[in-house]
Amino acid sequence: MANKLWLKFSVVALVAILGACSSSSSSAPVDLSPEAAAGREISINAGCASCHGADGNGNVGPKWIGLADSQVTLSDGTVVTADDDYLYTSIKEPGAMKRRGAVGIMPSNKLTDQEIASIIAYIRALK
């Protein structure tokens, strides 16, 4: 009897964990501009959503929700505003403006300036 109960509990826990890990199946925020919607799709296709979450909630990487125009403390103690310049540099040159407490480095990418602009529009839409 205890074995059956344990098995049922294990299956339920596994399903819950797997559901929480599936970032790219998350639904998009409702009110996205065409550019922000394109940025969301680019972030999924380029692999950004693997760490930041398709809905910006963060998994391995920092959350994108509420990031735009917030204060960010860098690894050297400098505090900067997460404006478009910061976001662009962080995407284009991973590690150039590493956040304090970040444990990894974002992999390099071959995103175009327009793709980065779309991702920034998406990050801005995540309030």
Image (spheres, helix red, strand yellow):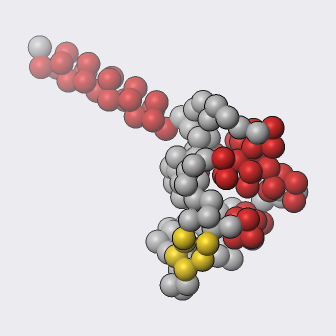
Residue 127 vs residue 6, the one in the foreground: 127
Q: How many marks?
A: 0
Q: Is residue 93 left or right of residue 30?
A: right
Q: Residue at x 56, y 38 (%)?
A: 23
Residue 38 seen by the camera: no
Coordinates of residue 107 in the picture (x, y in percent): 69, 62
Residue 80 vs residue 4, the one in the foreground: 80
Coordinates of residue 71 in the picture (x, y in percent): 54, 70
Residue 105 seen by the camera: yes
Q: Is residue 29 left or right of residue 34?
A: left
Q: Residue at x 70, y 47 (%)?
A: 122
Quarter of the view holding residue 108: bottom right
Q: Is residue 35 left or right of residue 29?
A: right
Q: Quadrant of the N terminus?
A: top left
> Residue farthest to the left?
1
Q: Residue at x 40, y 26 (%)?
A: 15
Residue 105 lies, with reference to residue 73, above or below; the image says: above
Residue 107 lies, with reference to residue 10, above or below; the image says: below
Coordinates of residue 11 in the picture (x, y in percent): 33, 23
Q: Residue at x 57, y 49 (%)?
A: 127
Coordinates of residue 25 in the picture (x, y in percent): 60, 30
